[in-house]
Amino acid sequence: MKTTTARNVLLFLLAFLGLGAAFGGSVLIISPSGKLFGMPLSMLENSPFSSFLIPGIILFIILGLVPMLLFFALLKKPTNKLAERFNFFNDMHWSWTFTIYVAFALIGWIQIEMFYVQSVHWSHTFYMFLAIAILFIALLPQVRGLYKK
């Protein structure tokens, strides 16, 4: 796969995740009862939440806003001293590292959701494969090469 093609696939995957999670999170924030999505509050009976508000906020920020910001950061490679403090891959640009973090956050989100809801939906499988695809593309040598310091 060509370097620009691989990077563009990664950007597409992050945009897809970000836009979808921002939409889903905002719907849960607007309708914490879950009615707009047709999700009964009984889905949360095994969770620490009494409404979908907190999960909606987490979804909106962590899996919505962050991937959308990373989309632009991967394109422009801006410097960010705060982000660099949390960059555990010192030889890589922070935006690449945070892309890895977001993929693992998505895996964690899906695992926690399945645990608390105590069921598996087709969307869980879809988003697990999305997280794996983000990791796979980000770890390709040609993509890593773009973000080496």
Image (spheres, grey):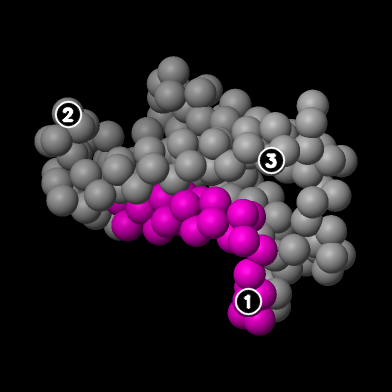
Is there any visible trace of residue 98 in the rendered image?
no
Residue at 72% across, 38% down: 4
Q: What amino acid type should be assigned to the residue bearing mark 2?
A: Gly
Q: Is residue 148 left or right of residue 99?
A: right
Packing grade of label 2 (10 A; few <14, some 14-19, many >=20) is few
Whole-number angstrom distance, CA of label 2 to CA of label 1: 40 Å
Task: Please give the label number shown on residue 7.
Answer: 3
Quarter location, residue 54: bottom left
Packing grade of label 1 (10 A; few <14, some 14-19, many >=20) is few
Pinpoint residue 145: horizontal percent, then vertical percent.
85, 49
Q: Nearer the viewer, residue 26 or 71?
A: 71
The magenta-colored residue range is: 55-83
Quarter location, residue 134: top right
Q: Check contact, mark 1 vs mark 3: CB within 8 A.
A: no
Find numbered disc 2 in the image and state the secondary structure of the residue it sits on. Answer: loop
Pinpoint residue 33: horizontal percent, then vertical percent.
14, 44
Pinpoint residue 24: horizontal percent, then vertical percent.
30, 41
- Can you identify the residue that label 1 sits on? 80
Pinpoint residue 79: horizontal percent, then vertical percent.
66, 75
The answer to whether residue 90 is above or below residue 106 is below
